[in-house]
Image (tube, rainbow, N blue to C red):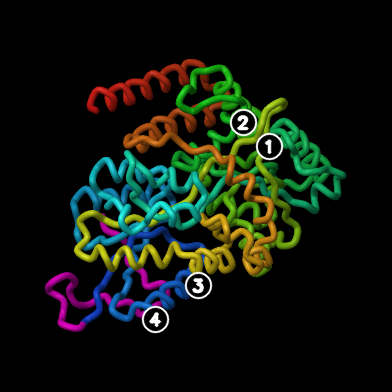
Amino acid sequence: MVFALASLGLALLTAGCVGDQRDAGAPIVLRVAVWKANNPEAWNEALARFHAAHPGIRVQLDIGPNSSTQLHDLITQKLRNRDASLDAFLMDVVWPAEFAAAGWALALDEWFAPEQRAAFFPGTIEAVSYQGHVYGIPFNTDSGLLYYRSDLLADHGLSPPATWPELTSQARRILAQQGDPRLTGYSGQLRKYEGLVCNLLEFVAANGGDLLEPAAPPAIAAVAFARDSIVHAIAPRGILTYDEQESLDLFRSGGAIFLRSWPYAWTILQDPAQSQVAGRVGIAALPAFPGGRPAAALGGWSFGVHSASRHVREAVAFITFMTGPEMQTHFAIQAGKAPARRGIFRDPGVLAANPHFADLLAVFETARPRPRTPIYPRISHILQRYLHEALSDPDSPLERLARDTQAEIERELATLRSAG
């Protein structure tokens, strides 16, 4: 399987060789693996600025899917094969430990000093660190957020829900009174992929549970609530097939009252050219369970350098540029990407384009990370299989499924410990 190549509207060099075989005086071509952008214009401008500042380098983007799971499979195939033509790549927040332990990602300590790391959210630095070294530079940060139809809540005299039971009660009330068969209560990302783990982490953690202990009563109760009160009560039939794009499409077409998504969705939802509900959307922290505290999955992406790259210095120059204050400000304004650099949240231009960022600092400070382990992909696949099966059947035997899943997770972790 190979990456689909795309130019994002730029004149990128695709001919000629790289490394020692390239023509004398020809620019070095860097190949960088990224996801399919929701805002390609922002990437167009970013690459144009980089090329202007570094005329001796040309970047060729290898575009993968916007599904984290599918992009992971594509990138790891190249890394496992030690494909030296791949120079740099985006990493989801849960990949650095795996890539570092496998020797695929280059340690960046000499280019990313501690005083430079201090400008970033601590959680983003923790995510790119493994055994005392850093293997990536944070590009943006993310956490789960609740979007809601502010017009519908106002029409029914409601405030944004503080608890999950309150959310389901509000949705049922609005659905009953609106009488619109096209309207559903809730949209989220529950397809069997990494997004499902993020969504359910937020239910489980808000109930005082831990996804690595799925058989514990708080975790079982949270999954049961998601199954009984969300999936088979107020959500559309197709929610178990939704990723970020499908869930957002439903909400922005006016088909849902509530949406769980990431910060980037705000810019799209408020753009009349892209959203039928522009100007009628609010944003809030995700709900808690009664007596508890809300929980949001920590997300975000960083840039790493392939340890087999023949152009390490040029690759470092590119990722340093893309993660610098100028580009994080650019992507915040043009694409709604929440910066990994804390200071950018005080930028007047960023706040003018994203007024909701003023309320996100506290959410990012308390966002819940997923397990940081070299075998996280295996753990995630186990959880994806369990959660999707548990949610799909309204009569699923949750306790038995959870016990079997916990036993499987414990075996994987024990194997890792014995190998170490």
Viewer-proximal residue among 149 and 327 = 327
**Residue matched to label 4:** 52
Task: Give the residue type at disc 3.
Answer: Glu
Viewer-proximal residue among 269 and 317 = 317
Give left or right: position of 339 versus 284. Answer: left
Mark 2 closeness class: few <14, some 14–19, many ≥20 residues within 10 Å: many
Determine the CA span between mark 3 and mark 4: 17 Å
- Residue 206: numbered disc: 2
Task: Give the residue type at disc 4.
Answer: Ala
Q: Which of marks 1 and 4 is nearer the N terminus?
A: 4
Marks 1 & 2, CB-CB < 8 Å contact: yes
Q: Position of residue 238 (x, y in %)?
A: 56, 43
Determine the CA span between mark 2 and mark 4: 47 Å
Q: Which residue is drawn at 24% across and 53% down?
A: 78
Q: Which of marks 3 and 4 is nearer the N terminus?
A: 3
Q: Earlier in the sequence, mark 2 or mark 4?
A: 4
Q: Which residues fall within the magenta stretch?
A: 1-25
- Split into 4 quadrants, where in the image is the C terminus? top left
Marks 1 & 4, CB-CB < 8 Å contact: no
- Split into 4 quadrants, where in the image is the N terminus? bottom left
Q: Which residue is drawn at 59% across and 29% down?
A: 227
Determine the CA span between mark 1 and mark 4: 45 Å
For the question of whether residue 182 can be seen, the reply is no
Task: Give the residue type at disc 1.
Answer: Pro
Mark 1 closeness class: few <14, some 14–19, many ≥20 residues within 10 Å: many
Q: Which residue is drawn at 47% across and 22% down?
A: 213
**Residue matched to label 1:** 287
